[in-house]
Image (cartoon, grey):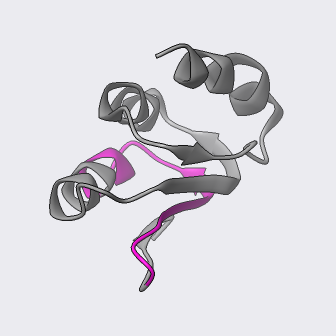
Amino acid sequence: MTVQLKDDGVIALVGDCPSGEAEVLLQHLVRAPDAVIDWRGCQSAHTAVIQVLLVARRVVKGPPAGAFLADVVAPRLKQR
């Protein structure tokens, strides 16, 4: 699993997050409405995962490990 709900309530994205992890991320967000997302270990993410991040409007700890996520996606998350 590349998307994990940690004991401290943080949702961690680690490694390469494929499309199937978008559903897992969404389930964690619903179960933990105050959770912070930590994507510092995320190297890449499918667009489905990125879409969930964009609509979630949560605090995201970063920057992510992947250059594309850091250069292109992270600024969009900060704009919301």
In the foreground, 29 or 59? 59
Hey, which residue is sitting farthest bottom in the picture? 7
Q: Quadrant of residue 57?
A: top left
Residue 17, how many percent across, how many down? 52, 50
Residue 64, how many percent across, how many down? 72, 44
Q: Which region shows up in magenta? A: 8-24
For image coordinates 30% across by 57% down, the residue present is 34
Q: What is the count of numbered marks?
A: 0
For image coordinates 55% across by 44% down, the residue present is 60
Residue 42, how many percent across, how many down? 66, 52
Residue 11, how many percent across, how many down? 44, 63
Q: Is residue 70 above or below residue 19?
A: above
In the foreground, 32 or 39? 32
Q: Is residue 14 one of those drawn in magenta?
A: yes
For image coordinates 24% across by 63% down, the residue present is 32
For image coordinates 45% across by 71% down, the residue present is 1
Give the left or right position of residue 61, taking residue 47 as reference.
right
Give the left or right position of residue 43, taking residue 35 as reference.
right
Q: Is residue 34 one of those drawn in magenta?
A: no
Give the left or right position of residue 2, taking residue 24 as reference.
right
